Image (cartoon, rainbow, N blue to C red):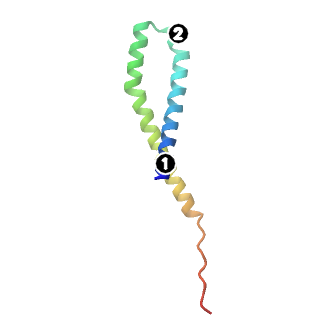
Amino acid sequence: MKTFLVYTFLAFLNFVINFAIYNYSFNNQATPFLHEEQRVDSALLMLKTTLPAYIISSIFLTVLFYLVANEYSRANRTPIPRETGQ
């Protein structure tokens, strides 16, 4: 359960960071050149397209990270030597 919560937090953090970067850059680059109606339309379009894309992207990257971490930890395990009854 602890691992699930860690990876859920990782996906959420990835989503928030990606969306914040996109939102900051969009506001700095495009917003000053838009009229109020265009800003509202742009915000609605951003919620319909960008938000789901970043959610899917963050989930995909988290699953990929989980698989790589499991494979890496499995490859680095050293077998425990067994005692022989001599």
Q: Residue at x 39, y 32 (%)?
A: 52
Picture quadrant of residue 28: top right
Q: Is residue 33 above or below residue 58?
A: above
| Tag 2 residue | 32
Residue found at the far bottom of this picture: 86
Q: Residue at x 49, y 52 (%)?
A: 3
The reply, left or right, for residue 46 in relation to residue 81 is left
Q: Is residue 69 above or below residue 9?
A: below
The reply, left or right, for residue 14 in relation to residue 47 is right
Callouts 2 and 1 close, C-beta under 8 Å? no
Q: Residues within 10 Å of mark 2 (few under 14, many from 20)?
A: few
Amino acid type of disc 2? Pro
Q: Mark 2 or mark 1: name the one nearer the start of the chain.
A: 2
Q: Residue at x 50, y 8 (%)?
A: 33
Residue found at the far front of this picture: 2
Residue 53 is situated, as x and y percent measured from the top left of the image, at 42, 33
Residue 86 is situated, as x and y percent measured from the top left of the image, at 62, 93
Q: Residue at x 61, y 78 (%)?
A: 81
Residue 82 is situated, as x and y percent measured from the top left of the image, at 59, 81
Q: Is residue 48 above or below residue 33?
A: below
Between the C-alphas of marks 2 and 1, the distance is 38 Å
Count the labels in the image.
2
Residue 22 is situated, as x and y percent measured from the top left of the image, at 51, 25
**Numbered label attached to residue 17:** none
Where disc 2 sits, the SS reads helix
Q: Residues within 10 Å of mark 1 (few under 14, many from 20)?
A: few
Amino acid type of disc 1? Leu
Q: Closest to the observer: 86 or 22?
A: 86
Where disc 1 sits, the SS reads helix
| Tag 1 residue | 64
